[in-house]
Image (cartoon, grey):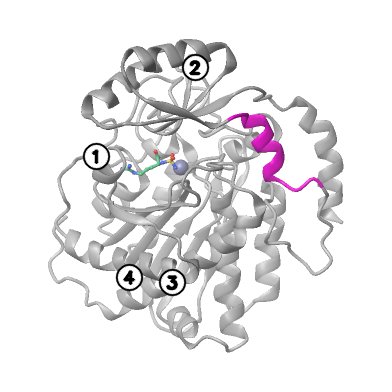
C-alpha cells in the first residue's frame, strides 16, 4: 500500500524532475597519463559529469559536438556507451507501483522515508538481535538512523561498520546494505547458517543504510544524477560537497577539488558536512570501548574492492593483510554468480582520492580492514542499474562479507599497529 501512495506522490513530484533527454555517456579509451591530463582539462567549467573518471563521461546534448571534436583532435578514441540517459533512468525502475503484500520488497529501489520505515520494521521483527540508534541529523534535518545488530554475549565484542548511499545516485548501495542486513538476521534466526550465528556472536555490526539522506532524497525528487550533499556554503557558487572528500584525514590532497561546482568538491574545510561529522564522532566515541575491525563504504559502480591508500600512491604498512582479505572477499563474490570484482589500493587501481571514508577508517581509526566497495555493474547501466540486478548484487556481496569476516575473525590482530 505504501508504495502505491509513494507512486501517486511521485506522479506530482516526478514532474519536477530534471530531464536527461539526449544526454549521452561516452566511454573513452584511456591508454596513457597524457590522455588522463587531456581528459581532466575537458571539464573546465564543470558542466560535464564523470560517471567513472577518466573513462565514462556524461555529456549534455549542447556540448556533444564540442566534446567529440576535442577528443578527436587529441586522438582519444571513444564510443557512445549510453545513447540516452533519460531512457535508462526510465528503464531502471519498474513502471508498475509495487504494492507490498508480504512485507518489504527488497527487489525495488526505495526512497529515504521507506528506508526509515524498513529500519524500524527490522527491530520489530528481530527485537533481541537488532536495535536502532541515530548518529544525528543531516543538514536538512533528516535522521541518520542506524541499526546495531548482533547476539548479546554479555561480553565486549569487536565491531564492524558498513554504510550505503554516501553518494546519492548510487541507489544499489542502500538496496544492497538492506538486503545483506536482513539476510544476516534471517539466516541466523532460521538456523540455516552456522557461520552467520558465529559472526553475530563475534561482532557488533553498526549499519547506516543512507549516509547522505538529503542528496539521496534529491536524487529521487529532483535530479536522478545528484551525487553530493545539499549544503551551500557561504561564498560558494554551487550546492553540494562530496562527502567522500570531506573526512578529516589527509583532507584536501590529491583527487579532491576546491571548486564548489566540481563533483569531487572537498568542502570549505574537513567535516564541513554534518553527515560526515556525525559518523566520524560516532565511530570515534564507540571505538573507545570497542575495537573496530572492518569498515566498508558501499558505492557503485565498477565492481571493485578498494583498500587504502587513496590520498597517495604509496602502499599502506598493512597492505599484505588487506590483500589477503580482499582476495578471499572477492573470490566469494565471484563464486556466487561469476562476477569479477577487481581489488587493490584505490589510488593505484582507480584514481587518487583525499579525505575519503576508507583512508579515514584506516588512517585515523586504525581499522585494519577499511574499504570502498564499488558494486555492479561495469558500465552498461552505470548508476542506473535495473532493479532486476539488485538480488544478484546483494547476494554476491553478502557472500563476500561472510567469507571476509570469517577470515578476519581467524586472523590475529597485528600486535604493533603501524598507523
Ligand atoms: O570517487 C569516489 O568517491 C568513488 N567512486 S564513485 O564513482 N562511487 O564516486 C571511489 C572512491 C575510491 N577511492 C579511490 N579511488 N581512492
Ligand atoms: Zn560513490
Residue 53 appears at what percent x and percent y?
Answer: 38, 33
The answer to whether residue 87 is magenta is yes
For marks 2 and 4 on the same chain, the one whose residue lies earlier in the sequence: 2
Q: Is residue 146 visible?
A: no
The answer to whether residue 90 is magenta is yes
Is 125 or 345 nearer to us in this picture? Answer: 345
- The C terminus sits in image quarter: bottom left
36 lies above or below 71: below
Q: Of the residues tagged 3 and 4, which is closer to the observer? A: 3
For marks 4 and 1 on the same chain, the one whose residue lies earlier in the sequence: 1
Mark 1, residues whose alpha carbon is within 10 Å: few (<14), some, or many (≥20)?
many
Q: Which residue is mark 2?
A: 47
Q: Quadrant of residue 60?
A: top right
Locate residue 142 relative to residue 227 in the image: left or right.
right
The answer to whether mark 3 is within 8 Å of ligand 1 is no
Q: Of the residues tagged 4 and 1, which is closer to the observer? A: 4
Amino acid at each position: 500500500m505504501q508504495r502505491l501512495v509513494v507512486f501517486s506522490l511521485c506522479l506530482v513530484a516526478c514532474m519536477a524532475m530534471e530531464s536527461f533527454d539526449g544526454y549521452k555517456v561516452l566511454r573513452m579509451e584511456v591508454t596513457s597519463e597524457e590522455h588522463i591530463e587531456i581528459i581532466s582539462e575537458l571539464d573546465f567549467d564543470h558542466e560535464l559529469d564523470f560517471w567513472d573518471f577518466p573513462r565514462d563521461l556524461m555529456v549534455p546534448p549542447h556540448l556533444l559536438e564540442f566534446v567529440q571534436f576535442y577528443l578527436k583532435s587529441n586522438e582519444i578514441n571513444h564510443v557512445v556507451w549510453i545513447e540516452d540517459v533519460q531512457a535508462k533512468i526510465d528503464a531502471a525502475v519498474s513502471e508498475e507501483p509495487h504494492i507490498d503484500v508480504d512485507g518489504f520488497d527488497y527487489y525495488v529501489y526505495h526512497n529515504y522515508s521507506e528506508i526509515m520505515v524498513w529500519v524500524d520494521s527490522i527491530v520489530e521483527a528481530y527485537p533481541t538481535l537488532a536495535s536502532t540508534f541515530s548518529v544525528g541529523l543531516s543538514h536538512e534535518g533528516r535522521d541518520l538512523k542506524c541499526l546495531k545488530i548482533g547476539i548479546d554475549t554479555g561480553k565486549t565484542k569487536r565491531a564492524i561498520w558498513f554504510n550505503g548511499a554516501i553518494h546519492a545516485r548510487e541507489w544499489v548501495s542502500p538496496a544492497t546494505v538492506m538486503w545483506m542486513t536482513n539476510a544476516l538476521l534471517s539466516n541466523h534466526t532460521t538456523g540455516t547458517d552456522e557461520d552467520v550465528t558465529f559472526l553475530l556472536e563475534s561482532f557488533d555490526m553498526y549499519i547506516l543504510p543512507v549516509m547522505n539522506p538529503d542528496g539521496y532524497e534529491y536524487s529521487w525528487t529532483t535530479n536522478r544524477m545528484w551525487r553530493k550533499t545539499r549544503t551551500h556554503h557561504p561564498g560558494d557558487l554551487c550546492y553540494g560537497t562530496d562527502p567522500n572528500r570531506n573526512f578529516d584525514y589527509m583532507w584536501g590532497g590529491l583527487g579532491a577539488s576546491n571548486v564548489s561546482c566540481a563533483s569531487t568538491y572537498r568542502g570549505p574545510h574537513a567535516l564541513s558536512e554534518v553527515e560526515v561529522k556525525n559518523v566520524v564522532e560516532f565511530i570515534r566515541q564507540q571505538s573507545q570501548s570497542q575495537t573496530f575491525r572492518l569498515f566498508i563504504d558501499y558505492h557503485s559502480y565498477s565492481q571493485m574492492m578498494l583498500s587504502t591508500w587513496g590520498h597517495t600512491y604509496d602502499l599502506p604498512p598493512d597492505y599484505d593483510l588487506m590483500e589477503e582479505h580482499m582476495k578471499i572477499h572477492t573470490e566469494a563474490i565471484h563464486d556466487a554468480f561469476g562476477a569479477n570484482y577487481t581489488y587493490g589500493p584505490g589510488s593505484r587501481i582507480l584514481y587518487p582520492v583525499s579525505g575519503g571514508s576508507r583512508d579515514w577508517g584506516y588512517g585515523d581509526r586504525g581499522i585494519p580492514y577499511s574499504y570502498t566497495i564499488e558494486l555492479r555493474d561495469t558500465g552498461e547501466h552505470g548508476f542506473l542499474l535495473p532493479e532486476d540486478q539488485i538480488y544478484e548484487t546483494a547476494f554476491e556481496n553478502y557472500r563476500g562479507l561472510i567469507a571476509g569476516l570469517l577470515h578476519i575473525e581467524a586472523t590475529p590482530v597485528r600486535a604493533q599497529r603501524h598507523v
